[in-house]
Amino acid sequence: MELIIDTADVQAIKEINELLTVTGVTTNPTIITKSNKEPEVVIKEIADVLDEDQLFFIQAVATDFDGIMKEAKEISQIRPKNMYVKIPVTRDGLKAIKECKKLGIHTLATAIYSADEAFLAAMNGAEYLAPYVNRMCNYGDGVQEVKDLIEMLKVNNLPSKIVAASFKNTYQAHELIKAGIQAETLPPDVIMNMVDHPGTKIAVGEFTMNWQKAYHRTTLFK
């Protein structure tokens, strides 16, 4: 599975990138506004943190076909490779995804609320599909809908990868990993909740205490 960080917090990206095997970073207009920096500044900072083999996803802000295509071409030129344009699955967005496929521009279909929307974007050539898992739960069983999408792509032999998004807890992430999800884009807090189980901290503390009591040091060798 590909682990992708969903944030524009450069410090959080650095910390998690050092700690875990990270495939890349996703952003969206709302995430970038929360950085309280100009978008050009944030984009450059993130690009500088990532190595050339890691993926970088930036969303088009324009909502009309011509505007999306203009921004898609600009986004695709930010880095020599592994640059992806996020495009919402509106009518204009689906049209743009299809056009990007013809031009060789890498795309991620986003703002997905149903398996059907995602499937149609996959048919148009989107390389990644980002269903909003937690938000989908407001309309039904978001986790099951993504599981349906996994099967739909498989039986129809479509190569698009699902990068499940919009997580609020580790249970949702766990269930989709178990179901064979290809990728997840998680906010830093959810990632760290997966890392920092309280039981692990307790166990390590017990080991240290027992060792120090017996040998009066906290290292294996003197």
Image (tube, rainbow, N blue to C red):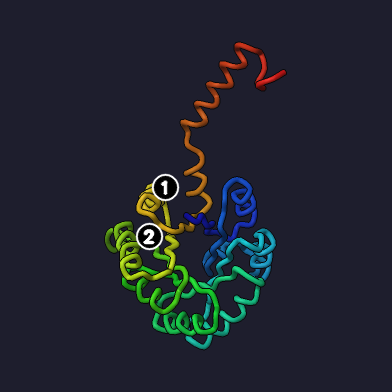
Whether 91 is drawn above or below 214: the answer is: below
Mark 2 lies on a secondary structure that is helix
Q: Position of residue 9 (x, y in %)?
A: 60, 57
Residue density around tag 1, few if under 14, some if 14–19, many if 20 or more, within 10 Å = some
Residue occupying the point 46% across, 80% down: 97
Q: Nearer the viewer, residue 36 or 150?
A: 150
Residue identified by numbered label 2? 133
Q: Nearer the viewer, residue 24 or 157?
A: 157
Residue 155 left/right relative to 204: left
Q: Nearer the viewer, residue 109 or 53?
A: 53
Whether 145 is drawn above or below 80: the answer is: above
Q: Amino acid at mark 1?
A: Thr
Q: Quadrant of the C terminus?
A: top right
Q: Which mark is residue 170?
A: 1
Callout 1–callout 2 Cβ contact below 8 Å:
no
Q: CA distance from mark 1 to mark 2?
A: 12 Å
Q: Amino acid at mark 2?
A: Val
